Image: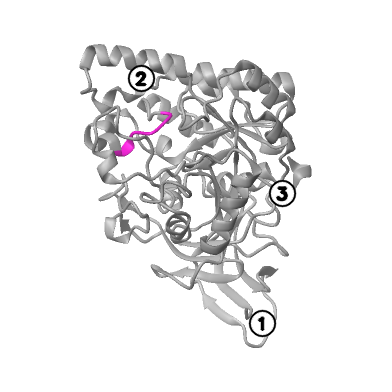
Amino acid sequence: MRPLLLANGIVVNEGEIRAADLLIAGGRIERIGAGPVPPGTEVVDLEGRHVLPGIIDDQVHFREPGMTHKADIASESRAAIAGGVTSYLDMPNNAPPCIDREGLRQKKAIAARSSFANYGFYLGATNTNVDELERATAADACGIKVFMGASTGNMLVDDENALEAIFSRAALPVVTHCEDSPMIREAERLARERFGEAVPMSEHPRIRSAEACYRSSSHAVGLARRHGTRLHVLHLTTARELELFAAGPIADKRITAEACVHHLWFDESDYARLGARIKCNPAIKTRADRDALRLAVAGDVIDVLATDHAPHTLEEKGRDYFRAPAGLPLVQQFLPMLLELARGGHLSLGQVVEKAAHNPARLFGIVDRGFIREGYVADLAIVDLETEVVVAASDLAYKCGWSPLEGETLHSSVLMTVLGGEIVFRDGRLLGGPRGQALQFNEASQ
């Protein structure tokens, strides 16, 4: 690997935006700023484009193993790289679910041969695997995923004794999906009474209600406070839930909050035109909820931004309400969507980087990534803030082949992605084969 100089860029990192060159050697950032250029260095003139740390998406469902008709690690990590996402943390609700260390080893083996981006994996909790969760270390998993709401397979954790044990004994960060399943089941029953099987998609935020979210998330926060657990609550969707979390820097918190980009982008009025394409769990809710989430991101109540990238085929999405699966593909458009929100004044460019690169690295103790620092691995996203792109199915790398954003105009684009010091995406083209590395996690920081 020969040295690489990224010249005339505008670096966005740790609260600063400044013009600087980046010299990369041996896969790492050797120098930030001007200086001698070693012989044989590849020089790329960025002509004033912005250089960001590679985005870290801490919540994806890449579907492998078990559901590879709709996505796999290779296809979705290609999409990630095309969107400036250099690292991802993949969820355990596979088929079979990843609920022990053998399952983790199998997923890592798949990723080692096929992932285009860097990878880490969660270990899934059940009502009966607390001993396995307690034995897991940072060498095994990035965290423990607890579905405190309906999930696939046997991954719903609804036994109170199991929850107490997980929150009191887990050594790794606990991340939660918070919805109250009994409330949801009762809402589904009432919807069937009213509509039969022809429930309109617009009922989704009432079936997966704000009350169901708050009851579960407040329960999780209460458990974490009682046991001193390192808790990260995923994909908040309601204004009311925000009262459970404090504003301030992530370094000062044991309990943190996350929002997904689609909950900052869409509101319930969008069901009329997009239907099941934006059906997700927890549901996209009211415009007031969306606006409250945006303010909470800007006010540092919400610490991390992610996608919950969850592809399904269009055939599956074309089914009726109860049979259409929840989830949408977003990882390729994640960074451009965040830049669009910044363009609209809902957060700053520095906050995009903080909440989608710095804070995931801090939260999970990701070693030597997530920042533009001398000595750190050179994972970078180079973006053009002035180039319009209309989202088209023909440009998508997702195996499922569609996006809820098709036809929308985004005013920023990812020009180049650098992974481990190598240019792996440039001017709309992926370069080379899988180069993703297993992320390392610093257990002391967790």
Q: Which mark is residue 139?
A: 3
| Mark 3 or 2, nearer chain start | 3
Query: Which residue is the site of mark 1?
Result: 37
Instruction: Determine which of the numbered discs, if any, sits on residue 309 in the image.
Output: none
Label 1, label 2: how far apart the Cα atoms are: 60 Å
Picture residue at 79% right of the left edge, 43% below the top: 444
User: Where is residue 56 shown, x and y percent of the image?
Assistant: 56, 50
Per the image, the residue denoted by label 2 is 207
State the residue at coordinates (42%, 25%).
Answer: 289
Q: Nearer the viewer, residue 179 or 38?
A: 179
Q: Is residue 330 left or right of residue 170?
A: left
- In primary-sequence order, the first of circles 3 and 1 is 1
Q: Is residue 266 left or right of residue 30?
A: left
Q: Amino acid at mark 3?
A: Ala
Q: Secondary structure at mark 2?
A: helix
Q: Which residues are magenta?
A: 277-282
Near mark 1 (Cα within 10 A), the count class, few <14, some 14-19 or many ≥20, is few
Question: Quick check: can you spot residue 53?
Answer: no
What's under tag 1, amino acid-wise?
Val
Q: Are marks 3 and 2 in contact (CB under 8 Å)?
A: no
On screen, 318 above or below 436? above
Looking at the image, is mark 1 or mark 2 earlier in the sequence? 1
Asked if residue 433 lies in the magenta stretch, the reply is no
Q: Main secondary structure of the magenta part?
A: loop
